[in-house]
């Protein structure tokens, strides 16, 4: 049978994805009242699963949701779901692998806090190599929107929650003017924070800079770059970064689970240095990252460029 | 057949509620990327439907979602759904009537902004009279959490969106200390803003005060009170209100679609005046509200106290 | 002789404009250490000169510059300069008429505060009807930049000073993405403030709204609209306005000395209402403004569209 | 001929300073729409010219001005101008050497962004040793004004622009009460930032502290002190500094291009330690600085005390 | 016996003032953990005692102190204390009349919140007419310190508490530069707030302005001026006021319990209008105030000038 | 005679505590216009007296109070007072030892700044072992109140002043909901600051974190922990800490003069890790602290549990 369907874990069962259906009274549908985490595979091998699941449990603690499973159990299920779906992957492609949790379905007529208990979904999604190929070839055109990143005193950016409207609105603002623009939000103090699931790094005079983790979701890919920089004896500083720092950087790049490392071409239309990507330190880190994951992820994207 | 199921509108069809099932890749499930609006019935009669649907369209404009239907069409469908469900209502009870919109289901492998198009659900929910009856008898015990309301520069509080985690986290914080506490968030400047779907009013020396609409979702019930106050020749001021103002108020009450008007017993454990509820102006407004909607909503709740 | 040169007042003399030359050690060249004011003519008649000169003197007081002339003297000189230049104006055109003051030229080798005394220039500039004609036909496409308006605690926006880089940088940011975009800065609290020499008005449900004067240079044209609104019995509120208010307005327009009133077509790419300009209240105010100044300024621009 | 005139580079020519005259429609005169940089000589030798020109180019990038010359060319011209002017310097004196750029002269009747192209001036100014001699003898009396430093979200303090009114107004506020007071502005968060072209350092328990570069123009002299401290094995921390830190410091000093290092006598009237200047670490750094530049700059000032 | 001693109420007894002695473990001595209120007499007649005692009770509610007496009882005692002290007043002089409350003396070895119960003192203090006479003759020289008024999110300025260090430090800052300067603090947003027990009013174009009560202790004298303005048909606006508004006001004055109304001569060294005091509206209000209290309080002060 | 009274130093004399009586016109009683410092004994031996007295002198400098005694003299007197009181201490108990300063008694009828000169008190207080014993057994339940810590721009938190209402109000807010809750205030930016005389530490992945000293009173006990951590080769970072950091910490503890180190059981009802106290690093530091002071302070408390 051609083109069989991917499967997903759904509250204790493994079912075809099309059967993972959520009642409309689910709190994550109604309120985004849920959390998730997501890693990717490289050549079908899952990347830093433990780090991602640990972060999922921190998100669960913050939101006060108890899924009744240990982290180890979640990891085991995740690996099983991946194994079941790997045969469906096209050659040379890879998956996002996600755990998604909702607080559950509201009980009609009950108190606001009565619900049917948490929902857990674990699934795989093919990575969008084609749609993003041009970003590795040309670099990303980053734009600062006027919408500011939700501040930690309102909702911790360290929690990978299902509340993304702040970043979605910012992204739409940028795309209304430049369909290829990549929104990187400033925080409420005016410093660089993060984009949709992505962290930023600047390079200046051989030193790497990235925003402090109080104001962004400190991604696992970000952490990987920090560790690679240490191995490569590159100095790295977590600090408040201004638009001026971005405009006058020697190099810049974005990290995310899917991107790993992708170079920035410009900030608000000002090319980074002479506009050629990637810069030498970005290149050095990209190669170290590829070695670490034993996968030339840049080539994976550029196949489609 | 006893106990038939309520129906709901779901993307063009009217189906039993249990068939309103959302794919897990829906953006409102994953990101809270949707908006809604909600009114209630009084004796089965829908309240200010047009005002609520107009606000829904403002939320749609802000989020850039086009549902391809006119406001008039949405109103017609809403009325039909209500009519179909009214026979299922218990005597003396009433419904919440909601329109819920998601931006749609993400296309796997596509660009972030490719999706299958918006989803629209219109449904009825019986009001939780029993769970809330004691609040009318004793007054609400309001608590200010340390979590601050998401500021307008990050996400407009005027949009009734599916991103409620800020308020949910605040509510959980309050309930961790007082299970009956009602969270009323302070904004990032330290002034009273709003609670979960609810607005606050203070009374001092015969004048009514309520937070400015820049920092809260200016509810239709709030607007109804403003209009009733004008009819009753009560002075009303929209202003920045401090915890001090709350602690030293003569009366206070909460408004929401379901509550209409419900008196406040205390703020952070300090009783409002002598702690007896409702105060005279709250009572006067409650009666005017009941007259307006031709329904003694207080009695509707107190039946269960 | 065809095409004679306009003249200007320059520190006590009236000279051809090409002779108004400033030493490079002038503090306004080096630091923007100066103030100005500017009105326009309608059919060659100067508009509210006294109001503008009074504001110039408030700017002088704030900056501690004493030009050694009375306001009356400045008005007299201004009128003389206009009279001398009027013959050079093309038919149907009009002038900006400006007073410009610098604190003076720094004394080399002296203390920071030793200078040669203030410089005063009074001049006329033909209005750029052609370059702006399309804005009256199509409406202005307003964009909110990420750069925020300098806050009053750093430099009062009520002072019409020679320090415009904040707004220039914001304007360049917007134009880097949309060459026809008109930057309207948000203030450091996230509310609408002002653009380069321009104020904004929103119309919602028949009521006019404009930002409070603490955060913007409250222009004379803005004040004129406020007075016309009062005459037309239109309710007008000075308040903090959010991007949401802009996106959901029924109409919007910009006021400035040169524009008088010019309709807004969109905010951040979201069309105002159905995108047709001007809206009915904008039209009503435009006509009242034209009557007041006895000049169809819209037609003056549209000649060139 | 006695007392010949200094020359300056002016848009491609070298002319006597008195011929460097700017049309009044120049954007730097009207709006402070320009940037500059400035170093000094020691014994006629120019100090860290490359560092200053590199910073000029960062300021040009931020403001989007293209002067059509390479940094190397600007350095060559600068050195030539200095050479031409050195014979005019009094014995024992030195020059400030500056590059000044304006975006250019506005085209009358054109669009806001049409101008005649950038203006570049390179010039020399004798240092004001006499006017400042007493500061080395007695120490500087620093005062915190109520005016707050323009925040980075409005205009980057890292750009050496022609917009100085924020600091000028602050300086005038301080001098209205103490003619010898030196304004050091607090930033909008209440921390020490910078004064007119000057940075501050505190010494406490043998450690040096200076404000973080996000909130100040990180001067080349500041950087020189940071490097000298490293050579002298003195610990140095860039951090947020409060007025309390200033009041309770053991020593304090100001750095600037002209000052190099000048001791602080008091903050807001509270003497630093016992009020004797310079303190031991300030002295140690001053001597190292003098060695580096091969010039006893303190003596250069004290000649006039 | 010449010069007998004033008496005071002290926890249930009336004793000579010198016997009102507080244990050093009293929480108001150790922490400023107390509140007070204070009115004055005019010709020996107490002014608006009820309004002041009502405010005292609001301060008690905010701080959670219960003195076990009714407001009526406190008023009765206050009047008795005044009556007992009136014979000691010099001719033409008047008293401040104060209620002072401490939370009580800490129990040694006990929990932080164990104390011996509240202390109440009611006393009279002769007004300092001589020390302040010159302020009525010359006007007050107001200075804005760099210290900012404690914001409402930290401690409500509406509470007349025993925590005055914020204002004392600000006052000392101003006096370190100008011994006659009167500190008026800016709030944390940069707007005018209040001085030590004093409110500010500006007059511009015939309209009165005073800061909003969220950011200041809304004094009874301030309220009296608001009521007198209404009687005199003077327009009055409570609003955010900037230093610019102060510098460009036509008139300005300070109100306080002891001052009633006292004109301002300058703000930060910039004279208000032409520097002559009082201005016409200040004069009009001063006369109305004198009529209201049946006492020429200006003359009372000027006797000593 | 059984149970003789402790003595205290009071303005030059040593007297029984009951004779340390403060006139009610003392500025510390009326305004909290004073400062203090406080250390404790271990087995009767005073702890880091010099560090505490040095901090007292920094507080005196900030507030501009001159007590006319050298730090050495204050230390000598302190030691004498302790020696005189030690015989009164119960076996196994210890003292707080405090210096308390008021600016002095206001002169009636004089200028605001005329007072009788500073008052100095030096005294001993038995530590409240019994009242706090349960905190060592169970851990502290920390709660974040909605009241925010007074920011440094209003009053430096580095000064140990007599103005504690901000923290007292916060403490009362927490205790109104949980009588055993320990208030830890967030600063005005939303980060963890401090509680009543107490600092907080978090442990995550073997690294210690504590808030930066700009926003808290950097206690001597906090500094002691920092030094012990260095000796134990534990990495320690002073940083901005969020509620998320607290909720997801592996361990947490509070330091204060009396506590030394006391473990945290929960933050806002979320248990730290599995809720068992103390965690391993807390234990290691506690033991090192006990060794340093040669006193098992935990046992001292647990005697009473």
Image (cartoon, coloured by chain):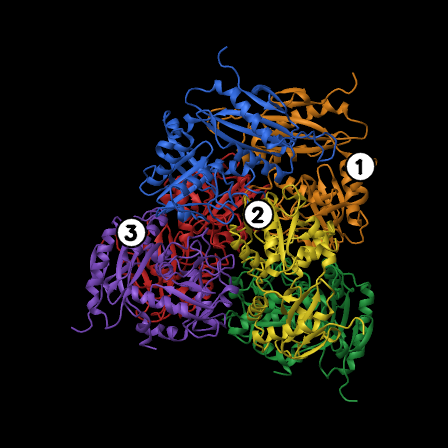
Chain colours: A yellow, B green, C orange, D blue, E red, F purple
Cα distance, mark 3 to mark 2? Answer: 56 Å
Q: Does D111 sit left or right of F31 as displayed?
A: right
Secondary structure of residue under mark 3: loop
Cα distance, mark 2 to mark 1? Answer: 49 Å
Tell me: residue A209, above or below residue E105: above
Q: Does F226 sit left or right of B149 as displayed?
A: left
- Could you say which is closer to the camera, residue B146 or residue B222? B146
Secondary structure of residue under mark 2: strand
Secondary structure of residue under mark 1: helix
Residue at (58%, 47%) from the top-left corner? D153
Name of the residue lying farthest toward the bottom = B1
Asked if marks 3 and 2 touch (Cβ < 8 Å), the reply is no
Q: Residue C301: give its label.
A: 1
Q: Does B169 sit left or right of E156 as displayed?
A: right
Residue designated by label 3: F118
Name of the residue lying farthest toward the top = D1
Residue at (73%, 84%) from the top-left corner? B91
Give the mark toward the camera: 1 or 3.
1
């Amino acid at each position: 049978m051609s083109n069989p369907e991917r499967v997903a874990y759904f509250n204790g069962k493994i079912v075809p994805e099309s059967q993972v259906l959520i009642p409309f009274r689910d709190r994550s549908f109604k309120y985004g009242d849920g959390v998730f985490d997501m890693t990717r595979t490289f050549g079908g091998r899952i990347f830093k699963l433990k780090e991602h699941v640990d972060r999922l449990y921190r998100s669960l603690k913050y939101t006060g949701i108890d899924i009744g499973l240990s982290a180890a159990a979640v990891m085991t299920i995740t690996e099983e779901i991946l194994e079941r779906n790997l045969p469906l992957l096209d050659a040379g492609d890879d998956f996002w692998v996600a755990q998604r949790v909702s607080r559950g379905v509201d009980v009609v007529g009950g108190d606001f806090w009565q619900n049917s208990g948490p929902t857990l979904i674990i699934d795989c999604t093919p990575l969008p190599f084609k749609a993003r190929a041009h970003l590795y070839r040309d670099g990303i055109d980053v734009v600062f929107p006027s919408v500011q990143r939700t501040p930690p005193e309102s909702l911790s950016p360290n929690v990978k929650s299902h509340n993304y409207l702040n970043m979605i609105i910012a992204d739409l603002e940028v795309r209304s003017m430049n369909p290829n623009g990549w929104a990187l939000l400033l925080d409420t103090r005016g410093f660089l924070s993060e984009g949709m699931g992505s962290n930023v790094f600047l390079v200046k005079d051989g030193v790497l800079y990235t925003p402090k983790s109080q104001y962004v979701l400190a991604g696992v890919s970000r952490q990987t770059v920090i560790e690679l920089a240490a191995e490569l004896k590159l100095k790295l500083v977590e600090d408040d970064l201004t638009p001026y720092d971005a405009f006058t950087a020697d190099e810049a790049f974005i990290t995310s689970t899917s991107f790993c490392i992708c170079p920035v071409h410009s900030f608000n239309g000002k090319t980074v240095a002479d506009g050629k990507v990637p810069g030498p330190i970005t290149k050095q880190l990209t190669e170290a990252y590829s070695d670490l994951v034993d996968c030339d992820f840049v080539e994976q994207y550029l196949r489609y460029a």
